[in-house]
Amino acid sequence: MSQSPRPLFSGGRHRAQRDRMARLPASANFLAPIIAETLLDRLAMVTREFRRTLLIGAHDAALVQHLRAIGTELTIVEAAPRLAAQTRAIAVEADAVDLPFASFDLILWPGGLDSVNDVPGALVRLRALLAPDGLLLGAFVGDGSLPRLRRAVMAEGVRSIARLHPQIDLAATGNLLQRVGFTLPVVDVEALTVRYGDWFGLVRDLRAAGLSSRLAPAPPPLTREEAARIAAAFAAHADPDGRIGEAFRIVHFSGWAPHPDQPQPARRGSGTASLADALKPKDQGRDP
C-alpha cells in the first residue's frame, strides 16, 4: 500500500503566520498593497462585469473593501481562523476549498500559490470553481526573489539551507495553467527592489508579509552565532551608503475557464508581445 507523500509545507505554521499578520498594522505588510494594486489594474483592463468573486486570502483589508464596494457578490476563503473570523471568511486552506463547481466568474489569489503542497491540484480545484469564461487572476513571490538572502543562507551551511523554500518560475506557472485546463494563460513578472539597513530588517518584512519559513518539519532555530554570520554575509553586499538592495520578483498569472466564444490562443512561439510589454511595468524601489 503506497503512502501519501510527506507534505512540504506545514498547514499549522501557515495558519499561525497568517494569524500573526492579522495582529499587525496594515502598513507592516508592504507587499500586499503592491500586489493588490497590480491585480486591480489588470482587472480594470477586462471589459466585462464580474458578479460572483472568490478572494483567496483576507489579509489585505483595503482589497476586501474595494471588492465589496464595487458590488460583486464576494466570497472569501482564509486559512487563518482568527483572520477568517475578522473578515467573515470561510476558514480553509486554498488547496482544500470545497465549494460548488462553476460558482464564480472571477477568482483572485493575491499570494500563496508558491507555498501550497499540491500546486497542480490547487489549480485544478480553482478551475472547477470557475464558470465558463471565468477569470483567475493571481500573484506570488516567484523564482529569482531574495537572491542575496539565499546566498547568505547557503553560505552558512546545511542547517541553514534547510530553511529555503523552493521557488516557482514563469515557465512552470504557464505550463501548469495550460495543463489543468485554463485557456489564454498569461504569466509575467513585476520586479521590485527593496533596500535594507541590515538582514534583520528584511526578516521583519518577510514575517509581516507571511513569507517566513513554512517548511515541514520546522527547521531548528538559528543559533545566535548562525544568525550573526548570515547577517554579516548579507551585509557584505551593501551599497556605498551601507544599505543592501534585495530583489522581489512578483509573478502575476491569469487564465480563463474555457468557453466556445473565446479567441483561439496563438500558436506557441508565435507571439511578439506579452502583457508585461503592454503594461510596461517599471522596476520599483523602496527604501524603508
Image (tube, grey):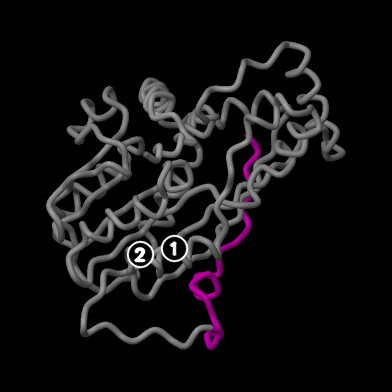
| Quarter-of-image position of residue 10 | top left
Q: Amino acid at mark 1?
A: Leu
Q: Quadrant of the N terminus?
A: top left
Q: Left or right: where does residue 275 sit relative to residue 161?
A: left
Magenta-colored segment: predominant secondary structure: loop
Residue extending farthest to the front is 1
Residue placed most toward the observer, 184 or 161? 161
Residue, x 25% and y 74% (percent of image)?
258
**Residue 56, quarter of picture:** top left
Element type at mark 1: helix
Which residue lies at the image location 41% right of the left edge and 26% below the top edge? 21
Q: What's drawn in magenta, residue-wise? A: 269-288
Residue 52 in the image: x percent, y percent?
A: 15, 56
Near-viewer residue (41 or 53): 53
Q: Residues within 10 Å of mark 1 (few under 14, many from 20)?
A: some
Residue contact between numbered discs 2 and 1, judged by CB atoms under 8 Å: yes
- Amino acid carrying label 2: it is Val
Circle 2 — which element?
loop
Placement of the C terminus among the 4 image quadrants = top right
Q: CA distance from mark 2 to mark 1?
A: 6 Å
Is 8 colored magenta in this rendering? no
Instruction: Please give left or right for residue 51 compared with residue 38 in the image.
Output: left
> Where is mark 2, residue-wise?
180
Specify the label residue 176 is tagged with: 1
Classed neighbour count for the residue bearing mark 2: other residues with Cα under 10 Å, few (<14), some (14–19), many (≥20)? some
In this view, the residue in front, 163 or 121, is 121
